Amino acid sequence: MSGCGRLLGRTGYVIARLWCRKMASAVEAQKPLIAVCQMTSTSDKEQNFSTCSHLVREAAARHACMVFLPEAFDYIGSSTEETLRLAETLQGDLIQRYSSLARDCSVWLSLGGFHEKGSKWDKDPRISNSHVILDAAGDIVSVYRKTHLFDVDLQSGVTLRESAFTVPGAEIVPPVSTPGGKVGLAVCYDLRFPEISSMLSREGAEILTYPSAFTVPTGLAHWEVLLRARAIENQCYVVAAAQTGAHNTRRTSYGHAMIVDPWGAVIAQCTEGTGVCYAEVNLPYLQRVRREMPVQGHRRPDLYNRVTRKTPG
């Protein structure tokens, strides 16, 4: 081969490599990898951060663009008094540490349920259960405060009164544009109220996320079926990071963190204990599902706020 031929050969090889990289980047942009975490929080905030940091760094090493942590990733107290004593503001040390973690790992973080000191703490010492989104620069880009509070007395003996120490959120926030897709924010018990997911999907959400600490009885009965239902009816990916195992002598969580696709198939799920599961968000597939069965276009919002009552005969 002449010198000119060898040069063209090398040039062609370089061009081909660059083209392949460009195509690979385009595919990655259409099928971003996300990571969903499972853990067992306790009242030891330092140990909880160590666990979360390890999970986030593991996911970043796998090139996940966004990592989802569960409700109460910061801690789970053994009493109302301890829960309130450990709370912080969004400007406090813990969120700053997570901002540094996001920045160091160049990943977006869904902090699924942060015990945020209320704005009127001196007069009303209650927290908000706040779902915080951090971008890869460590900046807070959205905060959703849980609107439905878990007040239950189950036949199994489980009694929880979230309203005893939590202020209910006052608004649903718009979906957040992230490298993984447009993410609609909710928290745990919100899963049982499909109105939120319907609103978020109408606002353009491609991913609905429900970071949770489901009890064992409700998890066994309802966890997977509710997550799959929200995915199917809204034609969205559903991402559910979860708490698992015994947090203290009074509280145990169901686990089974999972990712559901827009057709309702479970495409990733954590096994027992602390861990991470992964899935690609296939945005072209999501659009195909919506195109082939255009549910949003078939909705009848003109009928949904009223029931017509007619006198028989």
Image (cartoon, rainbow, N blue to C red):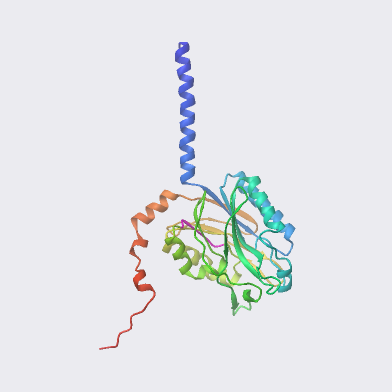
Viewport quadrant of the C terminus = bottom left
Measuring from the top left, give residue 290's x and y in whole percent: 38, 56
Q: Is residue 216 above or below residue 175?
A: below
What residue span does the magenta drawing correspond to? 205-210
Whether residue 75 is in magenta: the answer is no
Residue 71 can be seen, yes or no: no
The residue drawn where x is 41% and y is 51% is: 285
Residue 207 colored magenta?
yes
Residue at point 52% right, 69% down?
222
In this rendering, does residue 126 appear at all? Answer: yes
Q: Nearer the viewer, residue 68 or 275?
A: 68
Residue placed at 66% from the left, 53% from the top? 98
Q: Nearer the viewer, residue 273 or 116?
A: 116
Looking at the rendering, in which quadrant would you find the N terminus? top left
Return the residue found at the far top. 2
Provide residue 297's location: percent of width, then percent of height.
34, 61
Q: Is residue 105 left or right of residue 33?
A: right
Give residue 269's position: percent from left, percent from top.
Answer: 55, 57
Seen at 57% across and 67% down, the residue is: 146
Dividing the picture into quadrants, the one containing residue 45 is bottom right
In the image, residue 101 above or below residue 155: above
